[in-house]
Image (cartoon, grey):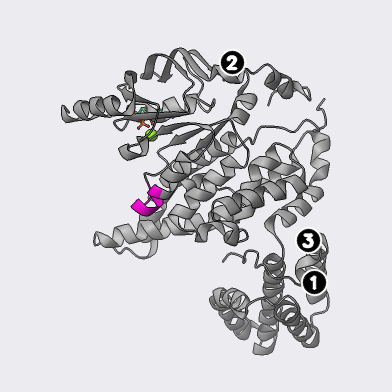
Amino acid sequence: MTLPLYVPVASPVHRLSAGVKLLCLAALAVLLFARPTLTVAGAALVGTLAVGLGVARLPVAVLARQAWALRWFLLALLVVHALTTDVASGAHTVLRLLTLVLAAAVVTATTRVTEMVAVVERLCAPLRLVGGRPQRVGLLIAMALRFIPVLVERADRIRAAQAARGGAPRGVRALRTTVAPLLVQLLQMAHDVSEALDARGADDVPAHRPRRT
Amino acid sequence: MRFRRPGAAPAAVDVADPGRGIELRGVGHRYGDRVVLEGIDLRLTEPRVGVVGANGSGKSTFARLLNGLVVPTDGQVLVDGLDTRTQVRAVRRRVGFVFQDPDAQIVHPTVAEDVAYGLENQGVPPDERAARVAEVLERYGLAGHADHPAHLLSGGQKQLLAIAGVLVMRPARIVFDEPTTLLDLVNARRVAELIAGLEQQVVVVTHQLDLLDGFDRVLVVDGGRVVEDAPPGPAVATYRALMEHR
Ligand SMILES: Nc1ncnc2c1ncn2[C@@H]1O[C@H](COP(=O)(O)OP(=O)(O)O)[C@@H](O)[C@H]1O
Ligand SMILES: [Mg+2]
């Protein structure tokens, strides 16, 4: 599962700073786990949907896709709870998790990656004191978001190529036959990407960078 | 990582002499024991330079020498008088590079963010950055896709995005390594037209020979040597003859 990317809409939620949105998300998580009552979880879910669909005017599909991607996980959770405790507590846990995932989706769909990355870079600013580069952490996050879909696509392509030649392995064997060629492609890609980063000035350090001692 | 005093790189830019073009002096390159290029002496000042040759002949290595992605194991490469070995940052600001596979050079998840990446590296202020990104996206027909995820673009659009990410940095020269190899005919033609319209000096490695129409100079690389250096007509003839005897 990957969180949705920015959906451009002119809404107050979109305009809110990334830092505030991330803080709200963190506060919601704390609230859901500190006050584990059905009322709180229900209200949080309704609130999240109201903000996401009502105020931010995100397409229903953006949030539905997130819930759909989690269906098996949530179902399994429900079953495990039903077997070990009871159905009600299972439903409750599922509700909380679903709410959090949807809230996270609302945040990522209304915030540009660059803004999110800027917040992370500010949080990592102390790294400078020990000679680290907060920008690198930010770039890493952006690149993870960029390359996860690429990775999935390459894996699909390998599976399709194998199926085209009559191989339709399943289970552990499928894992092995897909993972090995995928790793080879990944290594090649990592090399190509690092060259591209160099070519685009990844090392072209701006002059205002503090001096290291 | 080496210690660098702030301001060291910009000082190097000042000594560049734009008239000198790209010079290769006694250049050779080995990967381990394997000789990939040898005995190359050239000065490239023409606005349009093409490079052709068989697979594995050393074209990509040659292209990478021109902006310091590869440093020659023998000889020297100078860009406007700047040595790629010692002044690589200044060289890379002057020489943009477009790779064959756009997927590997798009590093941010959405279109506008990716175009802005190189400008961030150069420390361009946010306002100017946004203006320059918008201008480039507009010019290459990507304005409507500014906030779209890069992985949802078509192959042709991805290559346009990769090129936009280089052009926004306004390098004086751009090297293309097989920019149309992964594209269909329509998109290959669009990229060819885009390259033809550039004001920069361009060096294009390609297997698509019609891309070289109107070029000033074409190098034929074979077995790590430049075996022909001529206008497109004669150079392409030499290349065809060479390939027929394989
Ligand atoms: N990083 C590398 N390490 C080792 N060998 C390489 C490397 N890059 C290229 N080669 C080898 O050098 C030769 C020339 O490669 P390249 O410059 O990519 O040629 P071309 O672009 O004309 O196909 C090939 O035989 C290739 O296998
Ligand atoms: Mg090549």
Secondary structure at numbered mark 1: helix
**Where is residue B21 drawn, in percent x and y?**
53, 20
Q: Name the residue under label 1.
A: A12
Q: What stretch is highlighted in magenta?
A: B182-189
Q: Residue at x 58, y 64 (%)?
A: A2
Where in the image, quadrant-wise, is ligand 2 located?
top left
Chain for numbered disc 2: B
Give the prevailing secondary structure in the magenta stretch.
Answer: helix
As drawn, A206 above or below B153: above
Choose between B214 and A38: the one closer to the eye. B214
As drawn, A59 above or below A212: below
Residue B188 located within the stretch drawn in magenta: yes
Q: Nearer the viewer, mark 3 or mark 1?
A: 1
Q: Disc 1, disc 2: CB below 8 Å?
A: no
**Where is residue A192 drawn, in percent x and y?**
49, 39
Can residue B208 be seen here? The reply is no
Q: Can you tell which mark lies on residue A18?
A: 3
Choose between A40 and A9: the one closer to the eye. A9
Q: Nearer the viewer, mark 1 or mark 2?
A: 2
Secondary structure at numbered mark 2: loop
Instruction: First in sequence, mark 3 or 1: give its number.
Output: 1
As drawn, A8 above or below B50: below
Measure the C-alpha gap from mark 1 to mark 2: 53 Å
In the shown orientation, is residue B68 left or right of residue A169? right
Q: Mark 2 points at which residue?
A: B81
Choose between B156 and B76: the one closer to the eye. B156
Q: Which amino acid does label 3 sit on?
A: Ala
**Where is residue A61 drawn, in percent x and y?**
58, 78
Q: In which quarter of the image is the N terminus of chain B?
A: top right
Chain for numbered disc 1: A
Measure the C-alpha gap from mark 3 to mark 2: 45 Å
